[in-house]
Amino acid sequence: MEAFLGRKDFKRYTNDDVDRYRTELRRRANTNEADSLSISTLRHRASHIRRFLDWLIKQDHMEKLPRSLPDYVTLSKADTARAKKPEPRPYPADEEAVLLVSSIPGNSLVERRDRAIVATSFLLGTRANATASLRIKHINLERHCAFQIATESRIKNSKTQTTWFFPGDPIFEQTLTDWIRELERFGAMGDDALFPPDKELGRIAYWQIKSREPIEPWASSSGVEKAFRRASEAAKLPFFNPHSARHNVFFRKDRYCSTRRQRKAWSHNGGHENEAITERNYAKVTDRECRQVFSELAQSNGETLEDKDLMIDLQLGKLFPGTPEHARATKLIRARMDRGLGLGCSP
C-alpha cells in the first residue's frame, strides 16, 4: 500500500487514499490479469492493512486522521469471489508413491534412511516436522502403529494420539521395519532418533556405548524435505514435497473406506477432528481427474453399481421371472446389447 500511494506520509492519509488501494486490490482479483492475486493473499493483505490502520489512528500525532480509515480497506464477499482460485496441490498417485520409495538406491546409510523417511510418510501420513522428530520408541511394529506424543515430538496443535499404519502398498511398512532393525543392529535404542542426522550416521561406533546420551532428531523438517527431493530426482518425477504424501494418504481413503464410520476413523487417524476438514483441505480433485471421472460416467451410460449387480444376478440365475428385479435386469441387458456393449458388466 505504501508503494501504491507513493510513500505518502501516514499523517496525510485520507479515506480516498485507502479506497484507491482497495480498488487496486479489486482489480488484482480479476483472474484475467497477469498480476492477479489468490483469495488467500487478497484476504490477508486487506486484513493486515486494516489492523495496521486500526493501530495507526490511535497513535500520538495522528489525531487528524479519519477514524473511519480502516473501513475503507474492507473487502466484500463479491470482491474475494472474483479472486483467483488456488490450484489443487499436486500429490503422487499410488504407483508414484511406490516409485519414490523404491527408486532410492539404498547403497549407503543416508540413502536407506531417506528411503525409510519417504516410506514412513506414506505409511503414517505425518507432517514433515512430526516425521523429523520421531524416535524409535514411538514406533510399535507389532501393533502396526506410531505414538505421537506432544511432549516428545513436534506435532501440530500439540495433539497427542496413536496413529495406526494406513493401508497401502506393503513396501511402506517393510521399508520402515527394515530400517528399524538395521538401527537396532548398530546399537540404537528407543530414545534415539528414528531418522538420525547425517553426522550421527557417520559415527556408528558411538552407538555401541551403553552410557551414551540419546541421539537427537533433527531440529527442523529440512532433512525430510531433502529426502523427498532426492527421491523425486531418483524416480525422475516432479518434486513432491513431504506434505504431498499426506495428500496421497487421504486420497486413499475412498478406496479403502466403504462406510461413514470407516471414513471418520481414517480422518481421525490422520489427526483431523472430523471428516469435513479432510475433504476441505486434502486430495482435492484436479481438472484432469474431473475430466477422467466424467468420461467414465459417460461410458457407463447411466448404469449404477446396483444395475450391474442386477445384471450379474440375472446371468447367475438368482432372479425370479415376474419380479421387478428380473424385469429391470432384462431391460438393462437388452439396452447393453443394443449399444453393442455385450455382457461385460462386472463391477
Image: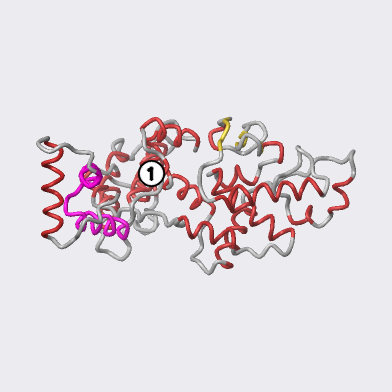
| 258 and 23: which is toward the camera | 258
Dominant SS of magenta comes to helix
Please tell me whether residue 246 belongs to the stretch shown in magenta.
Answer: no
Q: In the current view of this chain or complex, which residue is farthest to the bottom? A: 236
- Quadrant of residue 190 within the rendered picture: top right
Q: How far across and how far down the image is residue 344, in percent?
A: 25, 56
- Quadrant of residue 292 within the rendered picture: bottom left
Q: Determine whether the residue tagged by mark 1 lies in a helix, strand or loop.
A: helix
| 187 and 212: which is toward the camera | 187
Q: Which residues are magenta?
A: 287-316
Q: How far across and how far down the image is residue 293, in percent?
A: 27, 55
| 76 and 159: which is toward the camera | 159
The amino acid on which the numbered mark 1 sits, given as a three-letter code, is: Asp
Q: Which residue is mark 1?
A: 254
Residue occupying the point 51% across, 56% down: 97
Residue occupying the point 58% across, 37% down: 155
Residue occupying the point 73% across, 52% down: 197
Q: How far across and how far down the image is residue 323, in percent?
A: 12, 35
Please tell me whether residue 299 belongs to the stretch shown in magenta.
Answer: yes
Instruction: Decide if residue 218 is on the left or right side of residue 247.
Output: right
- Quadrant of residue 281 within the rendered picture: top left
Q: How far across and how far down the image is residue 30, in percent?
A: 24, 58
Examine the rendered structure and indicate whether residue 58 appears above or below residue 20.
above
